[in-house]
Amino acid sequence: MSRSGTRFTFEIDGLPAETFTVMDFHLSQSYSSLFSLNVSLASAEQAIPFEDILDETGVLTIWQGEQPQRRVKGVVTCCEQGDTGKHQTVYQLSIRPFLWRSSQRRNCRSFQNSDPKGIIGTLLTEMDTGSHDELFRNAHPQREFCVQFMETDYAFISRLVSEEGIFFYEQENLEGDDQVLVFADDRAGLQMLEPLPYNPNTASEAETYCINYFRRNAQISPAKATTKDYTFTAPNWQAEYQQVPERMPYQRPEYEFFDYPGRFKDEQHGADFARYQLDGWRNEVDFVVGASNSPQLQPGVCFPLTDHPREDLNDRWQVISIDMHGEQPQALIGQGGQGTTLNTRFKAIPWSQTWRPQPLPKPRVDGPQIALVTGPAGEEIYCDKHGRVRVKFAWDRYNNADQSSSCWVRVSQAWAGTGFGNIAIPRVGQEVIVDFLNGDPDQPIITGRTYHATNRAPGNLPATKTQTAIRTKTYKGDGFNELRFEDAPSQEEIYIHAEKDMNHIINNDRTSLTKRHSVDKVQGNSATLVQRNNIVHVDGTNSHYAGGNYVLSVGKGFTDGYRNLDMTKYQDNAADTLKQLALSAGAYGLTAGSGNMIVRVEGNRTEHINMADTSSTDGAKTINAGRDLTLNTSMLLNFHSGSHSKEMCGGAKLIQANNGIELHAGASSISLNNDGHITIKGSSISIEGMADIQLKAKIIGMEG
C-alpha cells in the first residue's frame, strides 16, 4: 500500500503492527461523551484469539504521507470475526475511550467534604482511565456530602460535571504519542488550528485541508434559568438566583426554566449553578454544521474560517462534535477502488462561547432506607449542636462505621419549636430509618427508628404487648428512666421510674385525687416546705409514728380544734414539737413510739381539759418547778402510792384545812377538828423528848 497521500493504520497493543490493515472506519465524537470508533479491518491471520484483542489498547492513526495527522486511542470493547477470503479475514472492532471503563462499574458511594476535582480524580484513578487534566478557571467548592447512588462511575462523573458547568474532551499530542482526557470550565484553554479556507469544490481526498460545506443555524432555547433551594442553617435566606443571556435576539424572556431544588447551599454555588444551567440549555442556540477533509477537526479545537462569501462567517469557530468516515478499499488484496477517502462532518459554535453540558437528571431514592448510627469508639451519643448524627448506610462499602461514616444527618422530632418541643438523639449502634428530601441521595434525613433481632424493645414481647413505654438508658451505664403505661384489663397502671432524681415544678395549682389508698415511702429524709398555709383534713384516724424524735416548730399558735389535743391556744411562741400533728384538726391521740418526746414552751403554758384528764407513766415521773408548784381542785384531791410516800421540805411546811385534818395509819389516827379539838388514838402512845416535855392546859386529865 502506498505510503503517500492519506492513509489509515490500526494497531493493538501486544500484536504485531502489520496484523491489521484498515478497510474503513467511522468515528463519532462530541463534548462530554464517550467517542465511538468502529473499524473494519483485514488481516492475514484467520483466527486471532479474542483475548488478544478485547480490553486491549487500539490506536487508529490517520497519516498524510509520513506525517501523522490524527491519532485516536482507546480500548477495544467489541470484536467480530467476519468472512475469510483467499488471503485475508475481515474483523470488525469497536473502540471506546479509556473513560468508557468507568461505565462498566455501577456503585453506591459517598464523598465527604470533597471538591469535584478530587472526586473525579479518585474515580478515574481507580478505573485506570489513563491521563487526565483539569483546566479550571472557576471556583468549584467542596461538597459536604456527594453521593453516587446506583449509577455507573461515568454517569456519576457526567452528572457531577454538568452541575458544575464542566465539559470534557480528548486532547491528542501527536508528538508525544499520548492522549489526555481534559476537564475544562472555560473555552480559554482550547487549541487553535491553522485557518481553514472555504472551498465547496474540493474532493475529500485532496491533500489541502479546507471546508467544503458550511451552514449556519439558530434555534429557540430557554431565555432564563432560575434556581431555588433551602437550607436549614439559613431558613430565612431567599436562596433564589436567576441568569439571563447578555444578548437575546429572537428570544422571549418568558422562556424560563425553573429548577428546584437547585442543589446549592451557599451564594457561590447558587449564582454559578444558575449561570451553568443557562449556558447548558443554550449551548447550541447559535451553531454551524459543515464538512471538511481535515482529520484534525475534533471537539476541543478551534479554527478560523476564511474565504466564505458571507463575511460574518469568516470568524473563529469551536468544534463541539464530529462524525468522521474514512475508506481505504485497497486494504483488501485484489480490491481496487477510488483510493483513500476521508470526510468529516462537524458541528461548531462561535469561538467566544463556552460550551457547557445541559443539566443531567439526578438519581432519586425510591423510598426510605435503613442505616446504623455511628460515632467515635467508646462514645454512645455523638451529635452536633443541631442534634444531627452520623450514620452508615447498608450500601456503603467504603466508609468505616465511625465518626466519618457520613455527613451530619438531621433527625426528625415529634415536635420542634423555638426553644420547645421534644428531643431524642439516636444513639450509636441504633438502627434508624433514613429518608431523602426530594428523593435526593445527597440530602438524607432520619424520620424514624426501629428495633431488630439484637437490638430488642424494652419488655418481653409479646407478653408485654399491652404496655406502652418510654425508657431511656443511662449514658455509659446500665441505669434507666422510664414512663410506662399498662393497658391490660384490671391491671391498668402508669409507672414512673427515675434512676436518680425527680423534680416537679408547677407554676400554678396542683390537684391530686386518689380514690382508694395512697402510700408514700421515703427511704431517706423527707421535707415539705409550704410558704403559706397547709391544711390536712382526715375524716378518720390520723396516726403519726416516729421511730426517733418527733420535733414540731410553730411560729405562732398551735391549735388542735377539738378532741384530745389542745396545746396553747392563741399564744405567742408555742412549743418546738409536733409541727405536722399540731396542724391536724381533730387528732385523737399522740404517740411518740419508742423515741423521746419533748415539749418546750418559751412563754406560759396552759392546759384545759373539758372532761377528765388521766396521766399515766410506766416508769418514774418527775415534776420540777423553778418556783412555786400549785395544785388547785374544786373538789376532792387524792394522792395514792402503791408503796411508800415520802415528802421532803427544805424549809417550813404548812398543812391547812378549813374543816379538819385526819391522819390514819392502820388502827392509829390523829384528828384535828376546825373547833380546835385534837384526838390521838392508838393501841399505845409513846412520847419521847430528847430534852424535856412540857404540857400546858387549864385542865389536864389522865386515866389509867
Image: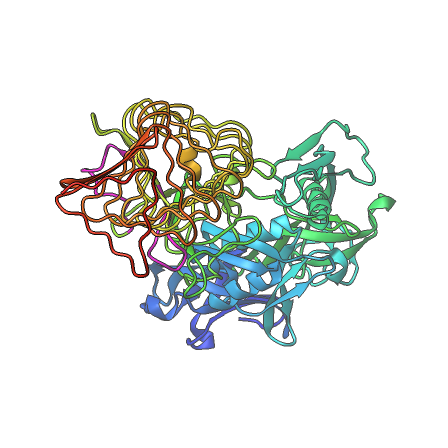
Q: Residue at x 58, y 60 (%)?
A: 114
Query: Which secondary structure dominates the residues rendered in magenta?
Result: loop
- Residue in front for this viewpoint, 223 or 401: 401
Residue 155 rendering spot, x and y as whole percentages: 50, 51
- Residue in front for this viewpoint, 630 or 405: 630
In the rendered structure, does residue 456 fall within the stretch colored magenta?
A: yes
- Residue in front for this viewpoint, 331 or 676: 676
Q: Is residue 447 above or below residue 536?
A: below
Residue 488 rendering spot, x and y as whole percentages: 22, 29
Residue 187 rendering spot, x and y as whole percentages: 74, 56
In magenta, the rendered stretch is: 455-482
- Residue in front for this viewpoint, 525 or 355: 525
In the rendered structure, does residue 21 fall within the stretch colored magenta?
A: no
Residue 135 rendering spot, x and y as whole percentages: 69, 63
Q: Residue at x 57, y 44 (%)?
A: 360
Residue 189 in the figure: left or right of residue 364: right
Residue 469 visible in image: no
Residue 529 visible in image: yes
Protein image colouring: rainbow
Q: Residue furthest right?
A: 311
Number of residue marks? 0
Image quadrant of residue 566?
Answer: top left
Image quadrant of residue 592?
Answer: top left
Residue 511 in the figure: left or right of residue 86: right
Residue 438 in the figure: left or right of residue 271: left
